[in-house]
Image (tube, rainbow, N blue to C red):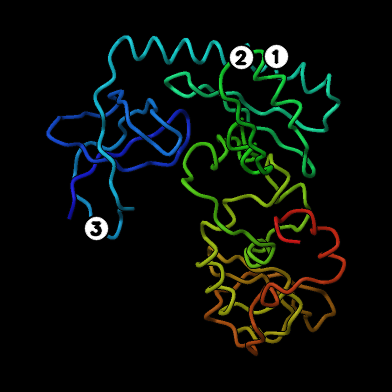
Amino acid sequence: MEKIVGIKFKNTAKVYYFAPGNEKFVRNDGVIVETARGVEYGTVVIEPKEVDDSEIVQPLKPIIRKATKADTERLKRNEDKAAEAMRVCAEKIEAHKLNMKLVSAEYTFDGSKLIFNFSAPGRIDFRDLVKDLAQVFRIRIELRQIGIRDETRMLGGLAPCGRPCCCSSCMSDFKKVSVKMAKNQGLSLNPSKISGLCGRLMCCLAYENDYYKDVCKKMPKVGSEVTSPDGKGVVVSVNMLKMTVKVKSELKDGSVEYKDYDVKDLKFKCCGGCADDGKLTKEEMEALKNLTDED
């Protein structure tokens, strides 16, 4: 077991562990720490506690000190300067006619480096742009090309559910998401229904996938024949949360009846689950090919 303090940087959801030393820290304390990018300003989100060694990436760096009023003022000045840097960089990008979208600008805490994040459809030769920016700002310039998911994480926004995007509010790392997860959950495979602001599959599809994957194996497939207490019928739909099945049955007088049954009251041939094991048709694959990061 080792004692740690959990720290976040800016508005990111990921928490980094640092060694607290002998000083006391409380939630929302500003701190100065050394990271791979240099000296940075962070905020305490987890007060000192002991965690298992397996949860720590060694070596655990110490917190340099608590942030002072002067440190907070410097952070504010850096943020104000970053807004002006965004404007200048955008003008330079347009002047060089580069096919890139500027996402953010950020000064390191000590002001020794200016980092620009951008997205682009392909590789960009930005060497001349860096030279121009270095002449303007007279400090070290770094340009980073980020993916469309990272762009959405930085910019944030409201997801289709009406809540802030998971990637910018509660997810520490991106998880692998597949169309198969959407099909397991019985969701419409309309791209507009299962994609987030980034245009890729919604991250939340992975949250309950294990449950749906297991339940699918216990449910009859839509369109298959089942035997209910009232006789034979065809499955119209399934509710994997209530564990019920809507069955269409033809009555003796020729009329059709729709009725919900608990899955345990039905007899059916197990054929891989209600979602065809998540297999996609060629048409579905073509319509959804741009929703994942995989080629």
Point out residue 14 in the picture as x, y percentages from the top left corner. 43, 41
Quarter of the figure that contains the N terminus: bottom left
Disc 1 to disc 2, how far (Cα)? 10 Å
Label 1 with label 2: CB-CB less than 8 Å: yes
Between residue 111 and residue 280, name the one nearer to us: 111
Q: Quadrant of residue 48?
A: top left
What percent of the width, then of the height, locates residue 77? Answer: 47, 10
Q: Residue at x 33, y 53 (%)?
A: 57
Q: Which residue is mark 1?
A: 88
Residue 96 % position (x, y)? 83, 24
Give the label on residue 137, or none: 2
Q: Determine which residue is flagged by label 3.
A: 53
Taking the spot 39% from the left edge, 27% from the top edge, the residue there is 40
Kind of residue indicated by mark 1 = Val
Callout 1: SS: helix
Q: Mark 2 belongs to which amino acid?
A: Phe
Q: Residues within 10 Å of mark 3 (few under 14, many from 20)?
A: few
Disc 2 from disc 3: Cα separation: 43 Å
